Amino acid sequence: MRAESAVVLFVLVLVVSSVSFVVPVGSSSAVDTEGLARDRPVGAFGDDPVRSSAPADPAPNPDTLAGFARVHDAGITGEDVRVGVVGSAFATGGGRLADDVTDRRRFAAGAPGLIADTSHDTAVAEIVSRTAPGADLYLASIGRDGGPEEYADAVAWLRTRGVDVIVDAGSYFPATAEGRERLNAVAAAATENGTAFVTSAGNYADRHWIGEGSEGWIGFANDTRYNSLGDGAVSGSVSLRLHWSGTDSYDLYLYRAVDGEDQLVAKSAADESADGRHTEAIDATLPVGQYYVAVRGGPDANGTVELFASHHDLAISSDAGGMVAPATAEGVVAVGAVDSVTGEPQPYSSTGPALDISAPDGTATNAAGEFYGSSAAAPLVGGTLTLMLAEDESLTPTEAQRVLRDAAIRVDGRLYLDTASAVRAVAPASSVQTTRPPWLRASANESRD
């Protein structure tokens, strides 16, 4: 069923974006815009009280695959295990990856197009192939404009192919709470039916804010009732999501700062809900300018609200959180990214209670060069689970996750991937040599679960 969205887009908006899982699932209908330009937080744009720190340059990368080499040297390569990778688009070409792909299918209307960017998803599949070179690889692409339906079809197809592990390094932002719940349900169902599901935690630490709502314009920090997009002028695709639960009501606003009275660009008041969860969504392509976000609560509103800007940093962001579907699904393994030299958490990597384990990014790939982000960390964990299942095919997803955690190195409450120890735990008679991951520095606060 198509849900009606109440999203206003003014003349400043050049094109309504149509990006994978970012566009509204339903149709859009205009609402009365008279007077909306005056409906804004007072003093909305000035000197930002909080600025996100500039992202650090990626550190030089050692061999993030060293732990896998020790397992491969013991003759464990993932043979007879089937691994599925979900992504927007893949380019196997005539390289080594093409030889490793057993089957592939596209679940999207229309051709991918000549300018489709395949580097991200191809790099994910490449890392899976290199970490488990003996495994059978299945690729399911949902296209740039894929939605929850295409996603469900892709995962269902992989399950009919009997895959043992699914790796999805994507983070998705459907425009409705129903779409978000469906994505989580698809991933959770896979684990419940015996398929290990690995996903990235996301890279939204600086693009996410969570806090207490209120009646009227909510304060993001120090009673500041607006949140700037980016550090200065921005342009191009803007995608905003506001999530909350309960019976409160909130509206989402996007403004452009100009001389005189700031201009309202878009407002979302659709309240797309499912089982007590709510979502407001704005998607637009904008000309160069300075923009900010504001949120207004209805009468007696006081619950927790969560704001995402999937394409831009927020001037005021939260230290913890920033995970979305399918990382928030029950039973999945959500993977965060850490620096491949120091082992320190990457500042852009999302965190929160749903984070299960961390692994290094920065692996050198043919498809994308040095590959950074939690998308680069997730296939390392997927490859580890594949090698574990090659030695003990009876492992359930829950059991495999427990072994993965028990074998991990704990530092300051965070679990770090130890591939050799995890495989050795399920294959104690093997010749796998367990040594400390070279990318993780020793710490006085280190322990094993």
Image: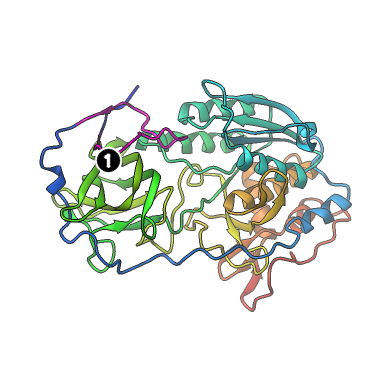
In-image side of 359 versus 236 (left or right): right
Compare residues 233 and 249 and report the one nearer the observer.
233
Kindly report the secondary structure that dominates the magenta region of the rendered protein. loop
Looking at the image, residue 413 lies above or below residue 147: below
- Asked whether, in this view, residue 64 is left or right of residue 37, the answer is right
Residue at 64% over, 57% down: 359
Residue at (58% x, 44% y) in the render: 169
Measured as percent of width and height from the top left, residue 216 is found at 16, 54
The image quarter containing residue 113 is top right
Residue 167 visible: no
Q: Which residue carries the number 1 mark?
A: 12
Taking the image as drawn, is residue 186 in sight?
Answer: yes
Q: Is residue 351 magenta?
A: no
Point out the image quarter for the N terminus: top left
The quadrant of the rendering that contains the C terminus is bottom right
| In magenta stretch: residue 13 | yes
Q: Residue at x 53, y 34 (%)?
A: 189
Q: Nearer the viewer, residue 94 or 383?
A: 94
Q: Position of residue 389 (x, y in %)?
A: 74, 42
Q: In the structure shown, which secondary structural element does the residue marked by tag 1 occupy?
A: loop
Highlighted range, magenta: 7-30
State the image coordinates of residue 355 (x, y, percent, origin top left): 53, 55
Q: Nearer the viewer, residue 208 or 371?
A: 371
